[in-house]
Image (spheres, rainbow, N blue to C red):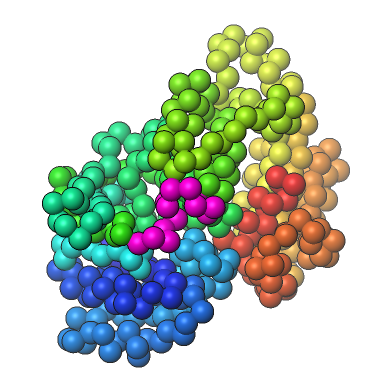
Amino acid sequence: MTTKVYCIIATHNRPELLKEAVLSVVHQTQHVDCMYIVNDGSDSLTSEEVREWIDDSNNLPQLTVMTNKRKRNSASGAWNTAIEHIENIEQSKQEDADIFLAFLDDDDTWESIHIETCLQTLEHSAGKADVIVSGIVRHTSENCSHNHAIHPPEDITPDLCMVKNPHIQGSNLFVRLEKMLEAGLFDENLPSCTDRDLVIRLLDVRSTFSSVDQKWTVNHNSLLQDRLSTRGSETKTNGLRLFYHKYRHRMTDSRSMGERKGNASELFDFDIGPFSEEEDDKSQPPKSVSHCTMTDSVGQSSLLKRTVLLCGIISDKNSGRITKTLKCLYEFSTELLEVHIYVLENSSAESLDLLSLEIDKWQKKGLKIVRITESLLCQWKDLFTDEWMQDCIESTVGKRRSIAISRTIIQKVLYA
């Protein structure tokens, strides 16, 4: 199986910085297969302009310049735009290839050995690594002696990511496309902390992480004034609060909670603030059966009988797969308090007829299933408060939606 590497750069009205980033990609000792530049700014950008920056056009990989088609003024939206495009291309080719994504911020650069080193690390893992991270040199001053070499920790866990910075960000993230899709892409609702959030979700889907051995191949520019991590900035504080709200119920011990609040206060001049007991009660999720500490069957049975399962399914043309899924849920439903299933239609008219018959069969057996049809989405349009999401839904009526849009819809419905 061949390995292909796609480089993705998100940029926002910083042509001089972007030029340095692009040149660092072009001068790699191991070239990427394609470079995607996603323009998230108001300034126009064309492939011809980018090619003019390159002295030796022979070194330029296949180049695609595109506009952010998802949430604007958002690096996450820009990156997701490119990932969706790459996914569609690879699906149409149907090649037997191992696809990796290498991200780069427009204000950062790679050392010339970055891609080569990542591929060597992949080889040393016998091809098993899903995520490869390299060390970062953080440039805080024009004086080189003040720069800081940072290496990610050897043991990366969700708990660690909730408490402190794992030093994994866009520019040193080299990740398998399959795992990126499984994790659900970048969360466009987070103004900041998006990299840390993605790492947690990659770990949740059992991605294997490997660190580049004692090499710092990414130069991170910390000299700019308008960065997402700027102390006390509105973007950073909003991101910290949303990140905390998203994961606070997984910060199970008081030490983790205290460390998280302390780090936020010290590094970013931000107080998460108290949450009332009423807020805690309303937002406390049901205890997962998989995390049950009871060992006796009677105790576990009692817990199951108090559990409500909310399940979202995106249905495509594979009717056999949904038949198997609904059968499993039906068999399991007898052990639970309630099971509610939401099925998002995402296929051709012929396949939807088969889906309708399949759902009717299981509804008659007692399963509570809601079909999310196009007409129902129109009735629920107030759920999707972001204008870009409403545009995505309207522009794909009657068409097969991408995995990113479909997952956003089903998650919005489930959490409503």
**Residue drawn at (44%, 55%), measured in percent from left and top?**
228
**Per the image, is 314 magenta?**
no
Picture coordinates of residue 40 (x, y %)?
Answer: 49, 73
Splitting the image into 4 quarters, where does residue 401 fall? bottom right
Horizontally, residue 245 falls left or right of residue 3, namely: right
Horizontally, residue 80 falls left or right of residue 223, namely: right
**Residue drawn at (26%, 73%), measured in percent from left and top?**
20
Look at the image and tell me whether residue 285 can be seen. Answer: yes
Picture coordinates of residue 191 (x, y %)?
Answer: 53, 54
**Residue drawn at (32%, 45%), measured in percent from left and top?**
167
**Per the image, is 226 magenta?**
yes
Is 49 drawn above or below residue 272 in the view shown? below
How many labels sit on residues?
Answer: 0
* Magenta residues, dominant SS class: loop
> Camera-side residue: 328 or 63?
63
> Camera-side residue: 86 or 394?
394
Q: Name the quadrant of the N terminus.
A: bottom left
Is 395 drawn above or below residue 407 in the view shown? below
Look at the image and tell me whether residue 117 can be seen. Answer: no
Picture coordinates of residue 19 (x, y %)?
Answer: 29, 77
Residue stretch in magenta: 224-236
**Residue drawn at (43%, 75%), measured in percent from left and top?**
13
Is 397 drawn above or below residue 143 in the view shown? below
Picture coordinates of residue 258 (x, y %)?
Answer: 48, 25
> Camera-side residue: 232 or 59?
232
